[in-house]
Amino acid sequence: MSVLVAFASRYGATRQIAQQIGAVLSVAGHDVRVRPTTAVGDLRDHEAVVLGSSIYRGHWMEQATTFAQEHQAELAQRPVWLFSSGLLGPEQPATDLDRFAALLGARDRQLFAGALEVRRLDLVDRALRLSPTRRHALRPGDYRDWVDIDHWAHQIAAQLSSSAHA
Ligand SMILES: Cc1cc2nc3c(=O)[nH]c(=O)nc-3n(C[C@H](O)[C@H](O)[C@H](O)COP(=O)(O)O)c2cc1C
């Protein structure tokens, strides 16, 4: 099947997760495009979509929410999987991940641990990271679990194959 893996990423951690998901789907025999949401026109050429964003201050990046809203009708007609990457974990309040999963009828949603490298942050994000409420939660490091990511991507590949043969 032709699959779009669309992502919104500020510093690259989520882009690499999207690329890894794309690689797994590709090895499983699917025709995969991995693209930033801002580089996607319409969804005509894509039979299924995986959409992911990093979380900043409790929300998906704006380009991911814009993508989900602008393509809502097309996404609702296709099998869709959603993921977020962040450092605060599932204890943060109701997320865009849940909201868009309901709105788009997503097959599944997944919150992945992300990565944060202080020297790459712009000045605004450096200051925000150090605000008293976030200082302890946003610890620099690469917390991405590639086994977890691969596992989720394999589940998508299996579901795609079974719908292709249905
Ligand atoms: C200023 C700032 C705010 C953040 N806010 C959140 C947040 O609210 N929830 C969360 O889970 N992670 C938060 N993070 C962590 C990022 O989502 C995480 O580092 C992510 O993997 C970055 O992905 P990217 O490089 O693709 O943008 C924040 C990071 C920074 C620097």
Image (spheres, rainbow, N blue to C red):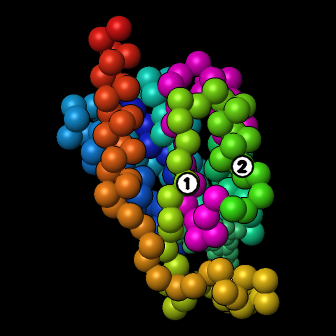
Q: Nearer the viewer, residue 94 or 62?
A: 94
Residue 103 in view? yes
Residue 45 seen by the camera: no
Seen at 32% across and 33% down, the residue is 157
- State which image quarter holds ligand 1: bottom right
The region drawn magenta spans 68-90
Q: In the image, which disc is placed on residue 111?
A: 1
Q: From the viewer's perspective, is residue 135 above or below residue 78? A: below
The C terminus is located in which quarter?
top left
Q: Dot 2, how many residues are within 10 Å of its Cα: few (below 14), some (14-19), or many (20+)?
A: some
Q: Secondary structure at mark 1?
A: strand
Q: Which residue in the protein does label 2 denote?
A: 96
Characterize the local packing of mark 1: few (<14), some (14-19) or many (20 or more) Cα atoms within 10 angstroms. some
Residue at position x 39%, y 45% in the image: 152
**Does residue 98 belong to the magenta stretch?**
no
Q: Is residue 93 left or right of residue 18?
A: right
The image's mark for residue 79 is none
Please name the residue shown 45% across and 28% down the image. 48
95 relative to 10 in the view: left or right: right
Q: How many marks?
A: 2
The residue type indicated by label 2 comes to: Asp
User: Does the magenta-highlighted stretch encompass residue 86?
Assistant: yes
Residue 112 location in percent, x, y? 50, 58
Query: Is 109 placed above or below 78 here?
Result: below
Residue nearer the viewer, 117 or 94: 94
Q: Position of residue 21 (x, y in %)?
A: 36, 48
* Image coordinates for residue 73, horizontal then vertical, percent: 68, 23
